[in-house]
Image (tube, rainbow, N blue to C red):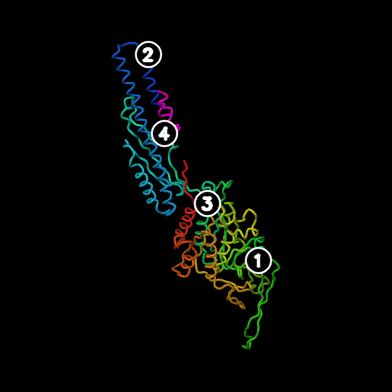
Amino acid sequence: MSALFASGRDGRSWTPMERDMTWRIGSRCRAGLAAFKGDRRGDVAMMFGLMAVVMMLAIGGAVDIGRWLHARQQTIYAMDAAVLAGGRALQLDTKDVNGAKAAAQRFYVENTKTRLALKSDTIQFTPADNNTAFTATGNAYISTPLLSLASIQQLPLLNTTGTDYSKAALAVGGNAELNLEISLMLDTSGSMSGTKIRDLKDAAEDLINIVVWEDQSQYTSKVAIAPFSADMRLPASIRDAARGTGHLRLKPVSYPCRNNQGQWTICTRDYHLTDCVAERPGNNRYTDVAPGPGNYVLPVYAAAPANGNSASCSQPAADEAMALTNNKQQLIAKVQGMPVGGGTAGHLGTAWAWYFLAPNWASAFPAESAPAAYGTPNLQKIAILMTDGEYNTQYDSQGIRTGSTGAGAAVNGSSIVQAKALCDGMKARGITVYTVGFDLGGNQTAINTLNYCATTPGHFYNAVDGEQLKQAFRDIALKISSLYLAK
């Protein structure tokens, strides 16, 4: 009898639940046989009758166990398929929870069509872990017509301890067996003040919490932050590597002007070196060639305020950019500490979203922030470009903002033209580009720019309010993530 229940019919090792179930049935059969063996009363007919009952019980047990195993395996396979389908539906649209549940249920029904009829089935599917997972709950029972002779009326298909329940979870980094490098271009211009900057901070923090995996021991998930307004502020070590050193502290600019008598003359205005940087001029203005002589970005020069002897760039110190890191606490602190102010030089944010992912720039960053080579196996490079308006700020060949007194023409053309060219270069390198517009108010120029920069139209989000902005960042985070079965 014990040999009958030693292993599965397909030769595989049984689970603890399967072994326990067969042991219980076998025990009852063995108990019956022992009682029969010890009973010396009765004649041959009685012995034959009892033997027949026991044998029928043993055969019936084997038949019912076979039915149970088949239904159990099919149910578990169907649950796995269902939670993956539900999780995938959530990745595509985290707002449509009911649609994800329906998708999971459809997959479950489709994969159990050939299953034996059950006595009951209460298995359901629902989101979990703040919509970053999808789980199965409930149980299913199969009738046991023959084992009912041994007072076993039904058998559960799933272990009630929960070890059999399927769960599809989102994986980033280690669990996905994937490395991620993500750069976030975040608009901190003056128009982002008030509730808008708070909405952006919450949206970015939510994304960071999803995509930066806790276990970075084997696979890493890193994020860079590139806040921008009218210029870009970099950490001192990166700034010197990007723009070079030895710049004039004061740059006098001459320009035609009228004197007090209304006559044309030449005036001079002093522009001071700031801690911020502008675009890169020259033949490599739209490439990721490493910085160096002839390939440095421009330093920003600004006029001093009245009675002042120095000038500041638009970006405050708290908006200093951050190269790639997997330190979640530092990333969230950077995002939550961002102030606002200044114009919208979107091409600068675009450029640095690329540079932080560009292996050619590795020498400009700390070793732990160096981007990996393009084409590295199991690596995804992703740029997320966010703005709330039209790009409207650019610089001349001296690093002076166009439109300023005495400034020349834009060294590379308009901010929009530059941003589009940089997006072309980024996408050509295999970087996936997501773009997010926020409260654009129907500005078609801004919409067209973001739509152009996105890898596909499906990578562009046009959020009309804070809730949609948060949803956009969450959708991107979920699309970046991979699904896996976690039991």
User: Residue tagged by mark 4?
Assistant: 10
The answer to whether residue 178 is above or below residue 458 is above
Read off the residue under disc 2: 38
> Mark 4: which secondary structure?
loop
Q: Which is in the foreground here, disc 2 or disc 3?
A: 2
| Label 3 crowd (10 A; few <14 / some 14-19 / many >=20) | some
- Local crowd at mark 4 within 10 Å, few (<14), some, or many (≥20)? few
Label 1 neighbour load within 10 Å: few <14, some 14-19, many 20+: many
Q: Pick whichever, 288 or 187, lies toward us.
A: 288
Q: Is residue 17 magenta?
A: yes
Are the residues flagged by discs 4 and 1 in contact, CB closer than 8 Å? no
Q: Which SS class for mark 3?
A: helix
Residue 108 in picture, x, y percent from top left? 37, 44
Question: Which numbered disc, 1 or 3, marks the residue that appears first in the sequence?
Answer: 3
In the foreground, 92 or 305? 92
Q: At label 3, which amino acid type do we have?
A: Asn
Query: Which numbered tag is attached to residue 418?
Result: none
Residue 392 spot, x, y in % from top left: 53, 71
CA distance for labels 2 and 1 = 97 Å
Q: Residue furthest right?
A: 246
Measuring 47% from the left and 43% from the top, which residue is drawn there? 486
